[in-house]
Image: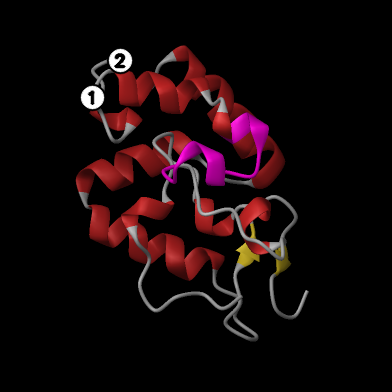
Amino acid sequence: MKMPEKMEATMIAPCGVNCLACSAHVSNKKPCPGCRAPIEEITRKGCQNCANKQCAFEQGFQWCFQCSRFPCTRIKRLDQRYRQNYNVNLIQNGSDAKNDMDAFLQVQREFFACRSCGGIIDQHHQKCSECG
């Protein structure tokens, strides 16, 4: 799976996770379409039942950073896990996206694009979708 020329905001979860670089998207024969897809198309149970996503959507937000409580306790816990396990800072992602979504998407594209072949680096396993 090659990195698209342009990252779409629809592939960023409300919490700031890049769904395009999620192992459920890059490592499956039937890629997960991301957190914003219809619930029956999302391949991971944790993503289907995500409390962060539900919280944002129930409040009428597309992004957690739109909430006055950002970063809330839930986001702080998820951010800590993602920073520790995957070197991804979700609080910074939210701040960057809030400041300039287009620039944030470009940085995400560059960060997760394989420099060798143009594939997508799986943020959970640090492996390229194309060349491993």
Q: Position of residue 19 (x, y in %)?
A: 52, 51
Of the pair 67 and 51, the residue shown nearer to us: 51
Q: Position of residue 121 (x, y in %)?
A: 63, 66
Q: Is residue 30 above or below residue 124?
A: below
Q: Which residue appears farthest toward the bottom when viewing the image?
A: 117
**Residue 10 appears left or right of 118:** left
Q: Residue at x 50, y 49 (%)?
A: 34
Residue 69 has which mark?
2
- Identified by mark 1, the residue type is Gly
Res. 125 in view: yes
Q: Residue at x 61, y 37 (%)?
A: 82
Q: Is residue 5 above or below residue 41?
A: below
Magenta stretch holds residue 38: yes
Residue 26 has which mark?
none
Q: Residue at x 71, y 66 (%)?
A: 29
Residue 78 figure quarter:
top right
Q: Quadrant of the C terminus?
A: bottom right
Check disc 1: other Cα within 10 Å, few if <14, some if 14-19, many if 20+: few
Of the pair 11 and 93, the residue shown nearer to us: 11
**Residue 63 appears left or right of 126:** left
Q: Which residue is mark 1?
A: 60
In magenta, the rendered stretch is 36-47
Q: Secondary structure at mark 2?
A: loop
- Identified by mark 2, the residue type is Arg
